[in-house]
Amino acid sequence: LLGGGDKAFLTGVGSFAAAHAAYITGFASRRDRGPLLGHPGLKAAAAMWATTAPVMGLAAARKSSGLGRPVAGYATILAAMFATSTLLDPRIDTSARRTLQAGTGLFLLSDSLLGVQEFLLREHSPALESAVMATYTAGQGLIAAGVART
């Protein structure tokens, strides 16, 4: 995602989307079988999606017409990954579930910051790029730690 040009960017988006699909599959296989309607995690994920997918999709399309839909789609799968992490079976250790949720939340933050850098700011920000990498690394580490605890 940090490479140059639309093709490199879309390749990164596709690769990360596949990884998120794998996370979604893993989380969904261990989900709470109770009612989902009104679940706070789903509400939070929906709010995150509503504030990221349209804005980033439109901003990406302004930068390059071929980026809008893939970026909006990626924001959708990212929100779904966060959502499924909030629906884990309550019999899973609370600490493990919270660690996973923190990790997926940081991953979502990382990619949102990346979207701001790529599509909303006029000038490159080294500080923002550092924040992207820090939140990405911390998110992945927390996801791995949460999975290890389950």
Image: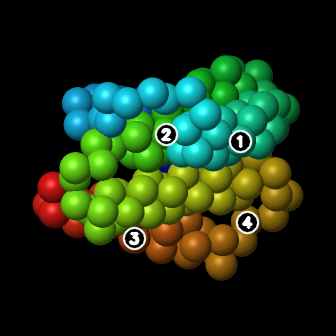
Residue depicted at 48% across the width and 73% down the height: 134
Amino acid type shown at disc 3: Ala
Label 2, on which residue?
83
Amino acid type shown at disc 4: His
Amino acid type shown at disc 1: Ala
Is 19 positioned to the left or the right of 42 in the image? left
Q: Position of residue 144 (x, y in %)?
A: 23, 60
Q: Earlier in the sequence, mark 1 or mark 3?
A: 1
Secondary structure of the residue carrying numbered label 4: loop
Disc 1 to disc 3: CB gap under 8 Å: no
Query: Mark 2 and mark 3: span between their CA atoms?
Result: 19 Å
Amino acid type shown at disc 2: Ala
Query: Mark 1 and mark 3: span between their CA atoms?
Result: 23 Å
1 or 4: mark nearer the eye:
1
Label 3, on which residue?
138
Query: Mark 2 and mark 1: span between their CA atoms?
Result: 11 Å
Q: Report which quarter residue 93 is drawn in.
A: bottom left
1 or 3: mark nearer the eye:
1
Query: Mark 4 and mark 3: span between their CA atoms?
Result: 22 Å
Label 4, on which residue?
124
Label 1, on which residue?
47
Q: Is disc 1 surrounded by few (<14), some (14 to 19) or many (20+) residues within 10 Å?
A: few
Q: Is disc 2 surrounded by few (<14), some (14 to 19) or many (20+) residues within 10 Å?
A: many
